[in-house]
Amino acid sequence: MTQEEGVVVSKVLSCNDTGENGSHQAGILVPKDPRILGFFPGLDSTGRNPSRVMRFRGPDGQEWEFRYVYYNNALSGGTRDEYRITRMTSFMRAYQLRAGDRLDFSKTGDVYSLGIERATTPIVAESGREDRSSTKGSWHITLTKEDMAKWKEQRQN
């Protein structure tokens, strides 16, 4: 899979992603959608749990390092068969990210960047208190018209 330029891959954060539900999961789950995986660098899936350190420029220009990993121990008798972005806790705390906020991953040349879009509507439970526990995270891909044409052309070659 190739790394796509001109593409914004967005993730609406869930409570699991931000740790608001007290879970101890390792990072943000990346779906196996080839269009989303194609944004991230390729990993050699023949080795156990291949990973790459990725550097992202945050909204304020600060550089952050995350780990992109394919947990493939299902190949050796384990149960995991998933892609994740880990080592994001400091970033999430620094920007006080919460469930419902959106992370926009983009790439220009060799530079990966992250944008943040805050959730605009509070999620309120029947008790009247804010409750984000029901927020489900989701991934989206956005292309400009020009980038869509380039993407289609690349796929045909």
Image (cartoon, rainbow, N blue to C red):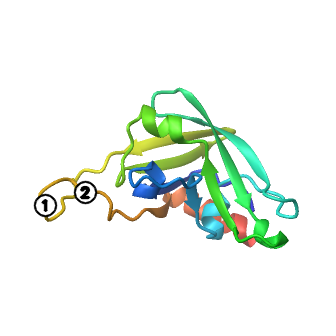
* Residue 157 at least partly seen: no
Q: Which residue is mark 2?
A: 131
Q: Position of residue 155 (x, y in %)?
A: 71, 69
Residue at left offset 55%, top offset 39%: 113
Pick the residue in front: 126 or 70.
126
Q: Residue at x 30, y 50 (%)?
A: 119
Task: Name the kind of residue labelled 2 in the image.
Answer: Asp
| Residue depicted at x 53% and y 53% | 24
Q: Quadrant of residue 154?
A: bottom right
Say which quadrant the C terminus sits in.
bottom right
Q: Is residue 87 left or right of residue 69?
A: left
Q: Residue furthest left?
A: 128
- Foreground pick, 52 / 80: 80
Q: Which percent across, then down, holds residue 10?
A: 48, 55
Residue behind mark 1: 127
Residue density around tag 2, few if under 14, some if 14–19, many if 20 or more, within 10 Å: some
Q: Secondary structure at mark 1?
A: loop
1 and 2 marks in contact (CB < 8 Å): yes
Dividing the image into 4 quarters, which one contains the N terminus?
A: bottom right
Q: Is residue 113 left or right of residue 67?
A: left
Q: Where's residue 102, x and y in %?
A: 40, 51
Number of numbered discs on residues:
2
Q: From the viewer's side, name the closer residue of 63 and 4.
A: 63
Let me know if residue 58 appears in the view. yes
